[in-house]
Image (spheres, helix red, strand yellow):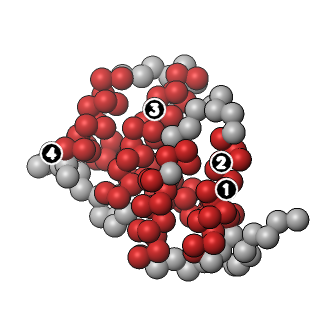
Amino acid sequence: MTTDIKCDKKQWTNAETIKLIELYRENSILWKHKRNDHGYRESRDIILKEFSQKFNCSADEIRRKLHNLRNQVSQELRKCNSKRSNITDGVFVSRWPYFNALKFLIPILSVKKTEDELRTKVPLDSTNVVRKIFFLYDAE
């Protein structure tokens, strides 16, 4: 029997979202794990439960919110990659308010993309991927 706090889909304030991102970044096991890391699942579940208590919602709601934030970062990266050649001043600036706070995910998401491309045997220009990642960091 779990004592997880239950609630419907939470309406997140900007302050709560920023606080969640800060906690997420501090707990790198949630976003920077190795596939063979024993104890990963248990550690992750404990951290998510702590987050759920802080935000008065379920661990599933925390997972949903983090999943959506990661997906949005990926979408912003795709925008940068697709619009890179169309930008006249050479700088892509995301208008999404949480992008800068989540930039720590860029290397992780880029590595995952590279692994996925290699698995599907799609030719990959690794120089291009690296250049685009550093382009984003330089845009600050």
Q: Position of residue 104 (x, y in %)?
A: 37, 47
Residue indicated by mark 2: 43
Is 106 left or right of 2, judged from the image as shown?
Answer: left
Tell me, yes or no, if residue 112 can be seen here.
yes
C-beta proximity under 8 Å, tags 3 and 1: no
Q: In the image, what residue type sits under mark 3? A: Val
Task: Give the mark, 2 or 3, whose residue is nearer the N terminus.
Answer: 2
* Helix, strand or loop status at disc 2: helix
C-beta proximity under 8 Å, tags 4 and 1: no
Within the image, what quadrant is residue 48 found in?
bottom right
Residue indicated by mark 3: 111
Q: In the image, what residue type sits under mark 4? A: Gly
C-beta proximity under 8 Å, tags 2 and 1: yes
Distance Cα–Cα, label 2 vs label 1: 5 Å
Q: Which residue is nearer to you in this view: 16 or 139?
A: 16
Residue indicated by mark 1: 46
Within the image, what quadrant is residue 133 found in?
top left
Tell me the mark number nearer the camera, choosing from 4 and 3: 3
User: Dot 3: few (<14), some (14–19), or many (≥20) neighbours within 10 Å?
Assistant: few
Q: Residue at x 45, y 32 (%)?
A: 111
Distance Cα–Cα, label 3 vs label 1: 26 Å
Q: In the image, what residue type sits under mark 2? A: Ser
Q: Position of residue 115 (x, y in %)?
A: 52, 27
